[in-house]
Image (cartoon, helix red, strand yellow):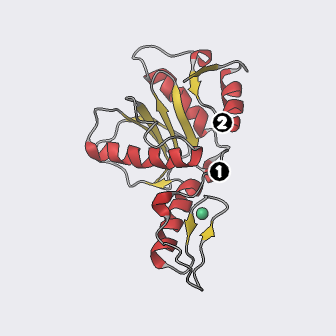
Amino acid sequence: MQKIAKKALTQLHLDLGQDNFSCRICKFCGMSYAPGEENDERMHTAYHASLLQGVRFMGWQSERVVRRDELGGRILLVLPSDSAAHLKKVKELSNLLEDQLGLVNGWLLSIPCKVYLYVAASKRVVGAQETACGVRVIWVSVEARLQGIASKLLDVARSTFVAGYVIPRQDLAFSQPTEHGRKFAASYTGCSSFLVYK
Ligand SMILES: [Zn+2]
């Protein structure tokens, strides 16, 4: 996966040459912060945990649950016509993924997408898939990997994207896959020459 450069938004300090000024760049999440600065530390802890453990999510009163699984997780579908509060959460998550994947800010939601969220029993979104005419992004938090969550998201999307029709695995198209994503797509679709769209 591509490591991101430090994010302009997260630079809270100007280095004006103070003697004791020190900024650290986290090797895991790529964020730069000043150790010992309360605000910086807090922002870094939250950002870091989102990538590692998923994004905190307390649930919505009216959720569109499309599947529940044996791990106590559930998959929610969010549509472009949903309430502003729901779309705000999707945007927050999209921004995080864009940062991590080195995508242009705003690209993921620049066209109307159906978004599938995997919410774990830990009350965190640990997997997400955004889909338009193909899979725009699919993501699983670091600690939630190797549990089949990406496959579950794709299975649900294939059977709920068009009413009354299950899209065959090999008909799925993926956008800008990373190396890791490429391997996953090949194994999921069963063909190394899976469809790619721009
Ligand atoms: Zn970090």
Where on the picture, by quarter, is residue 186?
A: top right
Please give the name of the residue rendered at 50% of the width and 16% of the height, measured from the top-left corner. Answer: 166
Where on the picture, by quarter, is residue 138?
A: top right
Residue pushed farthest bottom? 19
Front residue (pair 191, 70): 191
Residue pushed farthest front? 17
Residue pushed farthest left? 83
> Does 16 sit above or below residue 108?
below
Please give the name of the residue rendered at 59% of the width and 86% of the height, measured from the top-left corner. Answer: 19
Question: What SS does tag 2 mark?
Answer: loop
Q: Residues within 10 Å of mark 1 (few under 14, many from 20)?
A: few
Mark 2 residue type: Thr
Q: Which residue is mark 2?
A: 178
Please give the name of the residue rendered at 33% of the width and 32% of the height, measured from the top-left corner. Answer: 80
The answer to which of marks 1 and 2 sits earlier in the sequence is: 1
Quadrant of the snapshot with the C terminus: top right
Ligand 1 near label 1 (Cβ, under 8 Å)? Answer: no
Report the image quarter containing ligand 1: bottom right
Relative image position of residue 125 (x, y in whole percent): 48, 49
Relative image position of residue 107 (x, y in whole percent): 46, 36
Q: CA distance from mark 1 to mark 2?
A: 12 Å
Mark 1 residue type: Lys
Q: Which mark is residue 3?
A: 1
Relative image position of residue 83 (x, y in whole percent): 26, 40
